[in-house]
Image: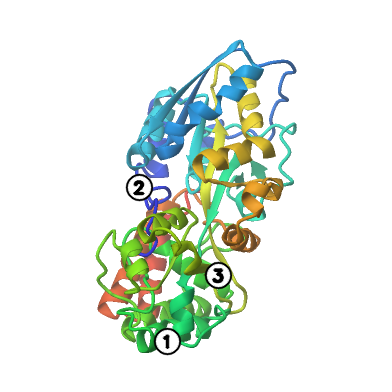
Amino acid sequence: MSLTARPTRRTVTGLGAAAALGLLAACGRPDAESGGGTAASAEPIAEGAATGSLTVWAMGAEGEKLPELLKGFQEQNPEVTVEVTPVPWDSAHDKFTSAIAAGTAPDVAQVGSTWMAEFVGLDALEPTPSEIATDDYFAGALDSVTVDETVYGVPWYVETRVVFYRKDLAEKAGITQPPTDWDGLVALAQAYQEQAEATWGISLQPGGTGSWQTVMPLIWSNGGDVVDEAGSAFTFESPQNEEALAYYQSYFTDGIANPAPADGTTEQDFVSGAVPMFISGPWMMSAVEAVGGEGFADKYGVFTMPVKESGSSFLGGANLGVFQGTKNRDAAWKLVQYLSTPEVQVEWFAQSTDLPALQQGWEDESVASNEKFEVFRAQLDTAIAPPVVATWEQVAASFDAQIEEVCKNDLAPAEALAATQSEAQGIGTGA
């Protein structure tokens, strides 16, 4: 799997929006159609220190590391108690939708970036108070918390994908500069095979869970998209999307990428040179360096996604949200406000390697001094968040299945996109 990493962060599938709305109605909680709906503005945050108790849910490694980070918040607010519950990513979506339906959601939580529209549609998240500034967030990250022109919560940390490549083997193949466009990426991959004895030129995911995260940047780069500007209709079928998917397919049909890669071998294959290029996020830096040992960091580099009409990448990460019905609203937002300061985001980076969602956080020496992180910083300027539609998890699963047919069974890209469009229309946007 070329995405290598944290695949369950944004690909967890649980109750669909329609099913969850049904649960809410059964519990007597109002939805938009029955006159409830989500507020378009937020009450201000009360002045003074936070007091009382707060419950916080966070997923994966973040859930384990967060209590240490929150010691500073509790020192500043000695009369508040914060209880953090770690939640596994693979069960998080179901846990949230069940808690929302039962009225037992936490005060504050880490929220997957593709869940925002769904949770807003369930009237589960509070709009962000004006005291929390949002002008310094990366644009794509802010898009991920914006539903119907209203901001809900804040981006917590960001991640994006770039191309990892073996610089030493590229030089052996006669290439001294990383490619900048689609044709150049193909040329480098082929040179690895022909001149550097690589088994495969690049590792790409041949469909399956999360493969849309690698295909979508090619679609965006080619001027395409899968939803209209209003987010009210799907647009999978287009010449731009077909060309992008055909380009992705060519890596498999031309023997450049393995159509049946083994799971969990990306790091080893990269270090051995068997597969000297892959696309992934910043967490893979420490992973490949751990396998490669001392000095390996000098043998590889990273570069931004190749350009067609533009150069785009996937913007992931996670957000922070305050849930409707919290009994300690002011303290909940004060906690979010604390986690939304540049210095705390830099401290969090030091603990977790999660990249700051605030651009100011990247000015700190601990981030700015690493030239590889600077490539991620440059990519974040053009990275795009997934479509903010309530049913995206279900639609993405359908797209993943069609990508697999394209890569493994040579299905025509136009047919795959038509099938995805039909299924997406049947699912709907949840609006």
Tag 2's secondary structure? Answer: loop
Cα distance between the residues tagged 1 and 2: 39 Å
Amino acid identity at mark 2: Thr
Q: Identify the mark nearer the N-term, 1 or 2.
A: 2
Q: Nearer the viewer, residue 83 or 403?
A: 83
Q: Amino acid at mark 3?
A: Phe
Is residue 132 at least partly visible in the picture?
A: yes
Q: Is residue 375 above or below residue 201?
A: above
Q: Is residue 30 visible?
A: no
Q: Residues within 10 Å of mark 2 (few under 14, many from 20)?
A: some
Residue under the image location 65 percent in, 41 percent down: 151
**If you read the primary sequence from the N terminus, does the residue marked by circle 3 or circle 1 appear first?**
1
Q: What secondary structure is marked by label 1? A: helix
Q: 224 or 355, which lies in front?
A: 355
64 or 86, which lies in front? 64
Corner quadrant of residue 375:
bottom right
For this view, does 221 lie left or right of residue 93? right
Give residue 313's position: percent from left, percent from top.
54, 64
Q: Check residue 92 in the rendering and tell me which mark sits there, or answer none.
A: none
Between disc 1 and disc 2, the foreground one is 1
Q: Quadrant of the N terminus?
A: bottom left
The answer to whether marks 2 and 3 mark residues whose Cβ atoms lie closer than 8 Å is no
Residue 303 numbered mark, or none: 3
Q: Give the numbered dot on residue 191.
A: 1
Residue under numbered circle 2: 13
Amino acid on which disc 1 is placed: Ala
